[in-house]
Image (cartoon, coloured by chain):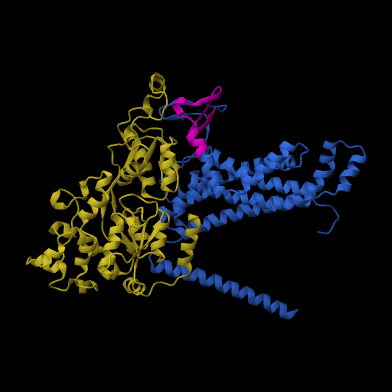
Amino acid sequence: MKTLFAVAAALTVVVGNAHAQSTLDAVVKKGYVQCGVNGGAVAGFSAPDSQGVWKGLDVDLCRAVAAAVFGDANKVRYTGLTAQQRFTALQSGEVDILSRNTTWTITRDTSLGLNFVGVNFYDGQGFMVPANFRAKGAKPAAKADAKGAARTGITSAKQLNGATVCVQPGTTTELNLSDYFRANGMTFKPVVIETLPEVLNAYFSGRCDVFTTDVSGLVSSRASRAPKPEEHIILPEVISKEPLGPAVRHGDDRWFDIVKWSLFATIEAEEMGLSSKNIDQQAGSKDPAVQRFVGATGDIGKMLGLDNKWAFNIIKQVGNYGESYDTHLKPLGFTRGLNNLWTKGGLMYAPPIR
Amino acid sequence: MKRDWIYQAALLAAAGLVFWFFVSNTAQNLETRKIASGFGFLWREAGFEIGETGAIAFSAADSYLRALGIGLWNTFRVAAIGVVFATLLGALVGLSRLSPNWLLAKLAAAYVEVIRNVPLLVQLFFWYAVIAENLPDPGEALQPLAGVFLSNRGIAFPTPWSTPVLSGFNFTGGAVLSPEFAALLVGLVTYTAAFIGEIVRAGVLSVGRGQVDAAYSIGLTRRSALRFVVLPLALRLIVPPLTSQYLNLAKNSSLAVAIGYPDLVSIANTTMNQTGQAIEGVAIIMAVFLTISLSISAFMNWYNQRVALKGVRQ
């Protein structure tokens, strides 16, 4: 099925003409933003709720762009994409924004015909193992200790020599995994399964000793998919830098600016103390920075080719970065960590909006 | 006559023009979008491991070309073994359905109807779940024979030069048949055998009653009649559709990606994603499957001519 998609998407590249029209014009004309999100339903980042409405941090970025462009955060349509489909979908014009927990790397930024606009989640790759390898109703006693000593009480990734590791294909994850084991002189057997539900099934059924992906994915999967979340632990080693961020097609600077500053606006608003709850009231504030932000003075919106209330609409309808984080990720057990504001010990830092 | 020739030339020119349009347009679009192209990536370091390499050495430091070669080998192994077993099982099912034994015939009929009416992908998930969920962890591996270990890591069995030993997480030494390989093989064999069974049954039923009676009348036993009269005649009708089933089996093996068997498509997927060169990757997959399919066809055509009636114009 994914191969079919790859062929179809490749064909779009083959047949379609280079987009002469700007993305903003095209988006305005069709009346909505087409947003590529994670089709594997990663709770907290992009997953449909019980009503079928997409929710999550990555989804909020798309909603923010829609709010900035149309003044209506709901003018978004979503395309669920697998790891393999995502770049082709963006390249071929299937989606206007790729907001699908995608790691920003130099290879992707330079050779895939796309541009990353920034980082909406600082992540790193980690490992999840059963807290107690004997937990699966098996005999826990002496035999296990005699024969399978290495299989009990894993506390560090350095103890994983010889392990079978479940991993999804086509991501930086596979490469980091190989690099880490090579660097530490260890071996492993990968079991590479494409879709998240299937790879998790394999791990939870005991086919693999370890499941690896970004720590955010581990936390999210453990909270939303594990039969018994308390039976799985995430090892302390974080073996890579995974700055996850939205990307747009290469060569359309106007659209690039819009998506980039929509992201920055949510971060800047949190720093300025503007939220969906107080923005109406704050709009009347005499603080010149707030005045500029809500579009009461200056013409920042016009510089982007948008309505002057673009940032006001984002915060009013979607909320600031911290609100999105608290709504979608906090309930799953995420702490802010690196994703806190720079003023609070994290890395979230927006250039000034002025 | 001359007009015919002109039409042919015009058709060829039109096809050439369409092809040229696709190629040049693609190249231009890739260029405008700054997407890398070409096959140079094949010689770069792959950087990923492959879970199952079929006794060929592979490490993350090897090239994409070698990785794809391993994928091709994995596809080839499962397809070749699958074809053999599917033929045997299919013949068994087809003949059973014709058996005078009522229970055997009905069981064979039920098998055919159930298996061929459930999508193969669902069956693969089923077999994979059965194998991975029901077998114990390596620590409590079953030992059906001395030195053979059955666990959710697969079947580890001794080879003349090494025996499997549990060390740490898994068995080392010996040879291993992985659950992914087993699930894919069982799925492909049982699925294809249902179709082959029907082909065999049709072939046998097509042999004229008169010819069978003639065989009995010269004193052949039921078994001898089947072997010397019915099957040689039936084979002529069985071979052409059988070829299609072999082709299907080879192509269906690409569903491996769903259950984690590192076949060519699975490895090409990873390659495409790491290099971003989807067009080249898809081209490789298409070229390989075309080669495999044409080879099977060529072989089966040769075999078909061998079993066909001699001296009769086709």
Magenta stretch: includes residue B121: no
Given the current orientation, which residue lies at the most extreme front position?
A51
Where's residue B287, x and y in %?
A: 56, 56
Where's residue B185, x and y in %?
A: 58, 41
Q: Is residue A217 above or below residue A130?
A: below
Residue closest to the eye, B260 or A224: A224
Determine the residue positioned at 35% across, 27% down: A152
Q: Is residue A316 left or right of residue A77?
A: left
Q: Is residue A16 left or right of residue A244?
A: right
Is residue B298 in view? yes
The magenta segment: B129-157
Q: Which chain is yellow?
A: A
Determine the residue positioned at 8% across, 66% down: A285
Q: Is residue A46 above or below residue B231?
A: below
Given the current orientation, which residue lies at the most extreme left position?
A286
Where's residue B110, x and y in %?
A: 66, 42
Query: Number of labelled discs?
Result: 0
Determine the residue positioned at 85% across, 49% down: B208
Give the drawing colour for chain B.
blue
Q: Is residue B197 above or below residue B162?
A: below
Magenta stretch: includes residue B134: yes
